[in-house]
Image (spheres, coloured by chain):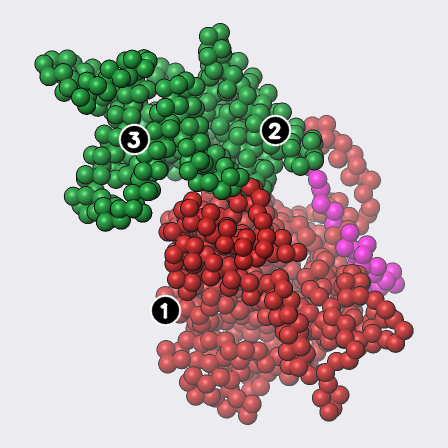
Amino acid sequence: MKLQALFVLIVFLTTPLIWRVPVFWKANCMAGITFLVLSFIAPLSLLLMLLVAISQWLIWQFDFFQSGRIGYKITCILPLLPLVFYKTEAGVQHWLIPLGLSFYSFRQVHVAFEVYKGQIQKPSLASYFQYLLFLPVMLIGPIHRMPEFKRSLRRMKWNANYFSEGLERILYGFVKIKFLGNFLCSLEIPQIAHQTNHFWLRLYLEVVAFTGNAYFQFAGFSDLAIGSGLLWGIKVMENFNAPFMATNMQEFWQRWHISLSSWCRDYVFYPLLALGRNRWFALICAMLVLALWHEISFRYIVWGIIQGLLILLTVTSRKKLPALSVFINQHPAGRWIGRLWVFHLFSFSCIIIGSEGISSLSENFKNLFF
Amino acid sequence: MLEKLFKQPPTKIFLQDGHKSYTYDWLKKKISQVSGLFKQLKLQHQDRLLLAISDEAEMSALFISALLNGITVVITDPESKSPRANSIISKTSPAVIIADKETLESWKLGTDSDVQVISYLKEKGTSAGILGKFLQKTRSETPANDYVRLLENAIPRDISQDPLTEDHIAYIIFTSGTTSDSKGVAITRLNLEAHLLTLEKVYSLNEESSLLNLLFLCHADGCIQGPILAAQTGCSWHKPFRFSLKKIPEFLDYGYANSISHIFVVPAMLHMILSFAENYEDSFLYPEFRAMLSVSAHLDAGLWDAFESTFKIRLSNIYGLTETVAGSLFSGPLSETYKKHSIGKPVDCKICIVNDSFDSVPLGETGELCLMGDHIMKQYWGSPAMTDEVFRNGWFLTGDLASMDEGGFVTIRGRKKNLIISGGINIQPEEITECLLKLEPVQEACAVGMPDEVFGEKLFAVVVLKPGFNTTGTDLVEKCRISLEEKKVPHRIIILQELPKGVSGKVQLNQLRELLAKQQTAQMLIQGNLFENDVLTIAADSFQVPVSALSIRDTSQTIAGWDSLAHLGFITSLEEHFKVRFNTAEIITMNSIRRATELIKEKNG
C-alpha cells in the first residue's frame, strides 16, 4: 500500500512536468520517470523487464529463427520463464518476487502474441519501453493493452475533466483500500464475527469479510492506477465492473479482474480452442492459468478448476434449463437471486485459497455446511 | 482578401505539419520575404508563377504571397510528368517556375525559354550547433537558382495597397485532359473572394476553428479548403501526414488530440476509415468537433448511412467543381441545407436543371445541373471555344445530371460529361487514351471508369495491339507510369482483338463497360463478392441472426451471438463449405466477417 501510495504521489508531483513538455516528449517523459523510480526501488525487476523486452525486440527486429515463425513463438514464451521461476516454490524460497513481474510479464506476452497474430506491428524499442514503463500500472496492474495505450498517447491533451476524474478515482481507491478493505472487512466484520456465539454465523461472516476485502483491495488498487493514469492524461482500462452485480459465473468473470480474465481468454482460451477445437478443455486451462497467475500452488489449482467448472455449469444450465436461465438473467427477482448465488459461490470458493491446507479446508467446509 | 491573417497573434498556429508548427508570425514574415523575392524577380501583376512544390508550408506561403501581390499562380502537381508539365508551361507562359528540384529534373524543360526556373530543395534538419553550421556551409554550395538561397538574399517587402481588380486572375488549375484539350480553370479574384466568404459562412468558421485537410495542395479542395480558407478566417490548418491505410488510427485520434473542428475528406477515405472503425467509434465525439465534410466525389448512400451510424455524427456532402472554386451546393453542415443522400441546396448561387433543349425540367425529373454565381470561373485559360461550350445564357453547365425535390434539395443522378472520378481525382479518359496510343504496341485504346466500392470508380483501359506485337496488360501499365501521374495510371489494361464500335466507327462505351463488367463478375465468382454472401449466410446460421441484419463490416463486438462456441461453429462451417483449414493464428484473429472473407480469399488464391 505504501509503495502504491508513493507511486501515486510521484505521479501527482510530476503531472505539471508531463503537461509542460511538448506532445512528442510526453511518452518518453513518463517512461523516464518510471525508469528512475524503478531504478531506485526495484532495480532487479527493471533489469529483468528490460532484458526480456530487448530480447523480444531483437528477435522481432532481426527475424531470428525464421522457419515456422518460431522466433515469434519464443517471444511469447520468453516473458513467462522468469515468472514461472519466481512463482514456483524453488524461486520463492530463495528470492523475492521482483516488483510487478506478474503484470509486466503478461503485458510482454500480450505484445508478443499480437505481433505473432499480425494484429499489431512490431513495436520500435522506444514505443515498447513507453508501454512497459508506465508507472501507474507497474505495481498492481491492470494488465493494460498496447493498442489502447498507444491510442491514449495519440489522444493526449490537457483535459480538466480527466484530471478531476483522476483525483476522484484516487480518492475512491483510498476509501476502498483503507476504509472498506482494511477497516471494515479486515477489522470490523471479523470483530463482529468473533462476538457472536453462533459458530456457523461467525465462519460465514469471516468468509464474507475475506471476499469483501479481496474485492475492495483489488478494486481500490485498480482505482489508484486508473486515477494516476488520468492525471498523466492516459486512460487505463477498467479492471472491475461491479462484479457482484453479475447474475451468473460467466458474467462474473467478465466483470472481475477484467484485464487478467480477458488476457486468459485471448492468450490461453482462444489459442487452445483453435488448437484442440475443444471448448471445455480450453476453458479449464484458461481458468487454471488465471488461478496460477496468483500463486503456483495446489490450492490455486483446485480453485481454478472449480471456477472453470462453475462457468461450465452456467453455460450448460443455459442450454439444459432455459426457463431457469431466463428467470435468473431477466426477471428482476431472478436477477437478485442470481447475484446472491454468484456472491456466495465465489465467496465459498475463496475458502479454498484462504485455507492453509487440506485439513483446514475440509474443516472449514464441514463447519459451514454440515 | 485574407486580411485576417495579418490580425492574428504572432504565436498562433497557422499550419501544424506533423510535430512542426508554423505560426502566423512565420507566415507574415514569409510573405514579406517572398514579396521581396517577387520584386527581385521583377514579377508584375498578372504575371504567371507556376508552382509545383510538395512542401506544404512553403507551397502555402508562396501561394498566399502571390495572391496578395496580384500574381497569377499556375498550380501544378509536382508529380506531373514531362509532357503534361510542358503542355501547361506552353499554354500559360509563366514568367517564373518554382518547383521541387526532382520535379524539374524529370520535366526536362527547354533551355531556350525566357522563363526563370527556380528549384526548391527541402532542407532536412535545420537544428543549430554543429549540424546547423555544417548546413550553413553546404548551403553556400547550392546553385544560384536555389529557392532557399534566393529567398535568404531577398529584401523583405511589405505588401502594397490593394490595386487589384476583381477580374484579376488569382490562379489557374489545369483539369485532366489530353495535352491539347486539358482545360486551365482560371479563377478570378472575385470568384475566390466570393467563395471564401460563402465557405466561411456555411462552415461557420471563426478564428477558433481548426481544419484538418490532408488532400493534395495541387487540387482545389486541398489548397482552397486548407491554407487559403485558414488564412481567410484566421484559423489553423492541420496537415500532419499523408493519408494512408497505415495512418488511419492516427487520423482518427488526431481530431480529438488537436481539437479539430472541421475535417475534409473524400469518399474513398471515408470508406477506408469505416473499415478501421472498430474501437474508434468515439473518435469524433468531442466538444470542439463541428463538421465532417465529404468533398470532390459522389458520396454513396450506403457509405453515408454506414459512416453516420458508426461514428454517430452528421456527415456533410459538398458538391462543387474546380470551376466553382470548391463548392456550390451543400448538404450540411447547416441544418437548413442538410438532407441525407442529396447534395443539399445551393448557397450564394442560383441553380437550374435543364433538358437538352435548355428548358427547365419539372421537380423530380432529371436534367443537367447548371449554376450561376460570383464564384464560377469566367474562362478556361486561353481556350475561348472550350469556355463557350460550358456556358449558356450566363449559366455554367456542370455536365452532371441531377433532380430537385419539393424541398429544393438536389440529388445527383449521373454524369453527362465524359469524366472518371476515382478517389476524388478527376481523370479525363482521353488523357489516358492519348498516353496509351503513344505506346508502340498499341493500335487502338479506350479508357473507361468502372464502378468501385472504395474509389467510386476505377480506371480501366482496353487496347488493341498492332499486328505482330505481343505484350501484356501489366507491361502496358508499367509503361504508362512513365508518362502518367500515379493517380492516373489504369488499374488494369485489358487486351482485346477489337473494340466494340458503332456504325460511325466510334467506340461504344456502354458495350465496353458491359464487357468489362462481365469479366469482373466472372472474376468475382472465383475470388470476390459473390462468396461474401455465402460467408454471411454461414455467419447468420452460426450466430443465430437473420442474414439481412448482417454485413461484411460486422464484428464479434457488433454481433450479440458471437460467443466462443458460436465462433467455433462458424469456423467449422466455413472450413466445410469452402474446403479450407484455418490455422491457430487465423482462428484467433478471425474476429470479423470481413476478416473471415479475406482469409478464405487468401486460401483460395
Q: Is residue A47 left or right of residue A368?
A: right
The image position of residue A311, as x and y in percent, is 34, 36
Judge if badges 3 and 1 mark residues of a common chain: no
Distance from label 1 to label 2 (Cα)? 61 Å
Identify the subunit bearing mark 3.
Answer: A
Per the image, is B125 magenta? yes
Span shown in magenta: B102-128
The image position of residue B384, as x and y in percent, is 68, 81
Q: Which chain is red?
A: B
Q: Is residue B35 left or right of residue B292?
A: right
Per the image, the residue denoted by label 1 is B336
Front-lying residue, B572 or B337: B572
Q: Which mark is residue A134?
A: none
Q: Secondary structure at mark 2?
A: helix
Q: Is residue B542 left or right of residue B246?
A: left
Residue A220 visible (yes or no) = no
Per the image, the residue denoted by label 3 is A168
Q: Secondary structure at mark 1?
A: helix
Distance from label 3 to label 1 (Cα)? 43 Å
Q: Which chain is green?
A: A
Name the residue located 74 percent from the left edge and 47 percent from the top edge: B121
Name the residue located 31 percent from the left edge and 38 percent from the top edge: A313
Q: Amino acid at mark 1?
A: Glu
